[in-house]
Image (cartoon, rainbow, N blue to C red):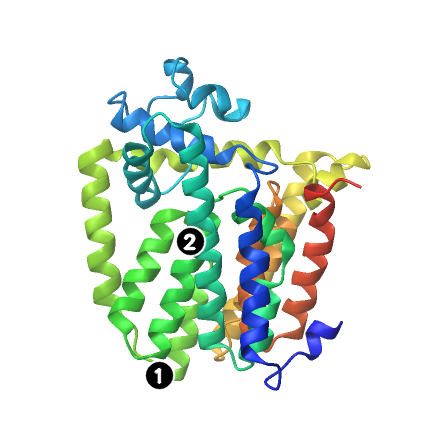
Amino acid sequence: MALLRLGAPARAGAVLAVAAAIQLVPLTAPVLLSTDVYSYWDYGRLAVVHEANPYEDTPIGFANDPAFKRMGAQWRQTTSVYGPAFTLASEGHAKAVGDSAAAAAWAYKALAALAMLAITLLAVRVAARPMFAAAFVGWNPLLAVHFAGGGHNDAWMMALVFAALALAAAGRRQLAGAAWALSIAVKWVALVFLPLRALEARRKGRRVGHAGFAATAAVVVGVATWRYGLSWVDAFGPVGRNLREGSRYSIPGRLESIGVPHGAAVGVLVGLFGLAYLWLLREAWRGHARLGLAAGLLLVAAPWLVPWYLVWTVPFAAVEEDGTAQVLALALTAYLLRDAVPL
C-alpha cells in the first residue's frame, strides 16, 4: 500500500525513471501472451497488399498471407473490429514493415510502449498528485506486459483521451475536441467516457471544442467512407459476437462457471452497469466526472474481458481523487494478473 501514500515529496526523476524502465523492458522480449499484433498487421495488409476491404473481407480469404498463420484463429474469419482511424493507420504500418513479421510485431509493440509513456506523462500533467499518478500508471507491470510486450491498440485510444484532458487543461479546447474524436475513431469504448466529461464541463462552465471534434470526426468519416465505403460502421458486429460469447476471466464468465446461465449473468451485470452509468451521469452533472469508476465498473460488467483493458481504468483512477476507483483499479489488476501469469 506504499503506492497509495506516494505524493508530491517523491523525487520526480526517480519515479519517472522507474516508470519508463517498467514500461519499456518488455520491448526486449518477443510478443507476449497475445497475437493481436498480427491481426492488426493482417487487416492492414488486406487493404494495401490484397486491395480488399478489412470491414467486408476476412483474413481466411487470403490464407497465404504471411500474417495469416500468425494471427489468432478466432480472428481468421472475422472482419475488423477496430475504428477507422486505427485501420487507416494499420495500412501505413503494413506498407512500412512489408513482409517482415518481426518488424510488424516490434513496430506495434514500440508504438504501444510509447503510448504508455505518453499516458504516464500526460497523467502527471493533469493530476493533482503528479508523482502518485506517474507511479500508479507507470509502475503497473501488467500494463507493461500487454503493451510493450503485446502491442495492443488500447494504449493508442487512451493516449488520445489523455491528450484531450491535457489540452483542455491548457485551454486548447479545439485540439482537445479533435483528440476525443480520434480516440473514438481508434476504439469505440471512448464513447463511454465522453458524455461524462461533457456534462462535467457544462456544469463547471468550461468551454469545450465542439468545432474541433466535429471537424476531425468529419475528416475521419469522409476518408473512411472513401476508403471502405460505409462498411466500417459494421465493426460493431464482431464486437457484439464477443459480447455474446464472453471470455473466461470476465465476471459474467465466472458466474457462468458456477452455474449461472450466460445470458442471465450478462443481463444482470450489464443492467447493473446501466443503472450505475445513470448515477455516474448524475455525478457528472453535479460537476464530478468519475471516469475511473465508470471504466472500472464497465470492466466488471463486460462479458469480454482481457487484461490489457485495464488501461481503460488505471490512468483515470491515477489522476482523479477517487479512492473507490483506485481500489477497484488495483483489485482488477490483481484479479487479471492470473490471466497474464497463470498461477
Which quarter of the image is occupied by the C terminus? top right
Residue name at image x 55 percent, y 44 percent: 28
Three-letter amino acid code at the position of disc 1:
Gly
Q: Which mark is residue 157?
A: 2
Q: Residue furthest bottom?
A: 9
Quadrant hosting residue 249: top right
Image x and y of residue 216, in percent: 23, 56
Describe residue 27's horizontal placement relative to residue 250 as left or right.
Answer: left
**Element type where label 1 sits in the image:** loop
Image x and y of residue 124, in percent: 49, 74
Above or below — where is 66 with respect to 82?
A: above
Above or below — where is 52 with respect to 320?
A: above
Quadrant hosting residue 322: bottom right
Q: Are marks 1 and 2 in contact (CB under 8 Å)?
A: no
Three-letter amino acid code at the position of disc 2:
Met
Which residue has dot 1 on it?
A: 205
